[in-house]
Amino acid sequence: MTRTTLRADAIAGFTGAAVVLPQGVAFATIAGLPPEFGIYTAIVAGLVAALFGSSMVMVSGPTTALSVIIYTTLSPLAEPGSPSYIELMLQLTVMVGVIQLAAGFARMGSVVSFVSHSVMTGFTAAAAILIVVSQLPTALGVQIPGGGTVFERLERVAFALPETNLTALLLSGVTLAAVVLLQRFSRVLPGFLLALVLGSLLGWVLQADLLGVRMVGALPGALPDLRVPDFNTSDTPDLAKGAFAIALIGLLEAVSIGRAMAIRRRERFNATQEIFGQAASNIVGGFFQNYASSGSFTRTGVNVEMGARTPLATVFASLFLALMMLLVLPLIAHIPRPAMAGLILYVAYRLIDQREIRHVIRSSRGESAVLGVTFLSGLLIELDFAIYVGVIASLLLFLHKSSQPAVMVGAPKLVNGARKFVGAKDANLSECPQITIIRIDGLIYFGSVEHIEREFRKVEREHPQQRIKVLILKSVGDIDLAGADLLIEEIRTARRKGGDFHLIAQTTNMLGRLRRLQVIEELGHEKLHANKGEAIAAAVADADNEICRGCRIRLFHECATKPGAHAAMRELGY
């Protein structure tokens, strides 16, 4: 640590504190919690994750996605903001931490990254829509019952439109417009904070509280205190589904941000250590009035842009944020709730990654389906359930793709030693009458053997005279017992029909698998080859001399050693 890095971390920490102050209040509102809980989470969770995690610059704290799932998990069980709701939230936070701790001990750092990016894109888009719908009543200054699907909420908002409080609508509109303009003008300025200040000043000038506009209200304390949650095992089953979803999404956010920043900055990143850091932040946070947290895209981006060098920047941010809370605590009570809603509406809009959605739709039908299923599940069912639907859809897509590896019949240009004169006189003379070269790209396992066998039979129907097969396994990642049984049966079938079978395999892993699964024992060591040239030479040597005598194709260099070679070349003009 040097004076330069210390100064850079201090500046980044101060800026990060200024950014998270309004964000924390907004995110806590989304989660159905009193505003101070967002600040508490930013202070404690950010500090613990920085000390125990792996990333040098990632900042943890309250996030939009987790705030929404917390609300959807707890709101059916208790009134948002009530003491019982808060107790459930604290128990949920500790449960999330314990689940993440178990994931860390299971070394699931790489497994977490397996969830498709399309799942997260669809999930965050659904979360954004849900946030917008949940904040519309506050932005319009109307009170309607909560709960229900997105469309049920929209229907209630539509019926309440005639009761719109124009002052509330003005405050939310001005705050929203201010944050949009400030963010476009400069990404360095604390646009969230300035927009919220502007909305609050306008509310003060208009005396909005006298016009029926609700304020945030007084906060009970500036800093979090140690408090043991009231764990109630009877609530555990109701919280478990949401806890697993929050734990998974939290780890996805943290690992993806940490890995991306490490690559960008050419630093080392240990996903498992980061999981332990996130687990610690939630377990400790549950005893200091925090709700479930994860890595923050926004705050991490600001931290990097402001020149942060080490996790000390996050430590500074927590300290500065605690100091700000002591100084501005009385002022937070006078923030109009519609101004806060305007800020949250912008956060929701920024959650929808329109560019990525367009990219997925244009690039892949399968990934588009995964994105769409996740998105619709979040709107029509439950948001926490949507992540499981997306993961299952993504897994099914992967299994579908892996179950249909490419099975290609080798063209002459892919074969080592193909004669250039072939095709110059007769373009149709491009196949050896006795040898078929087949290449498989993908996995040979229980899920793909049916497809591969079907493709083999298709090759036999199209090339019935080619009884010698050369199978290239260089692009096969792995093979299981079912795949080995398929190869053994193909070897036996080829030999029963008077032909033979040759394999090309190079990697130590593949050779070891073929040996353990007794494929090489069935094949014979002399039929196993390291490259195409060696395999073709052996296959040509096995070819029937009488058929070769009348052949005028002479596809391979080795064909020159077979009977009738000189006559074939004279007929072709060579």
Image (tube, grey):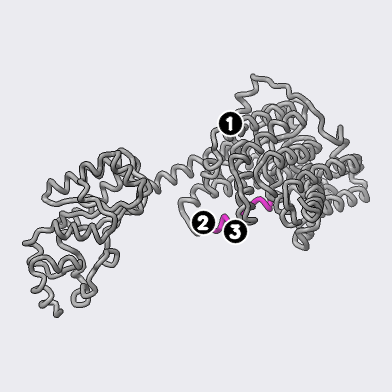
424 with respect to 391 (left or right) = left
Instruction: Identify the residue position indicated by label 2 in the image.
Output: 361
Amino acid type, mark 2: Ile
Residue 549 in the image: above or below residue 115: below
Nearer the observer: mark 2 or 1; the answer is: 1
Inspect this view and state whether residue 192 appears: no
Q: Are marks 3 and 1 in contact (CB under 8 Å)?
A: no
- Marks 2 and 1 sit apart, C-alpha to C-alpha, by 36 Å
Residue 89, given in percent of the width and then of the height, sits at: 71, 30
Q: Nearer the viewer, residue 548 or 380?
A: 548
Q: Residue 355 — which label? A: 3
Residue at left 14%, top 80%?
573
Please say whether residue 405 is one of the residues in the magenta stretch: no
Highlighted magenta segment, given as a residue range: 349-360
- Count of numbered marks: 3
Q: Earlier in the sequence, mark 2 or mark 1?
A: 1
338 with respect to 211 (left or right) = left
Residue 307 in the image: above or below residue 240: below
Residue 68, given in percent of the width and then of the height, sits at: 67, 40
Tag 1 secondary structure: helix
Q: Nearer the viewer, residue 341 or 44?
A: 44
Residue at left 20%, top 70%?
428
Q: Are marks 2 and 1 in contact (CB under 8 Å)?
A: no
Residue 43, given in percent of the width and then of the height, sits at: 78, 39
- Marks 3 and 1 sit apart, C-alpha to C-alpha, by 35 Å
Tag 2 secondary structure: helix
Instruction: Identify the residue position indicated by label 1 in the image.
Output: 102
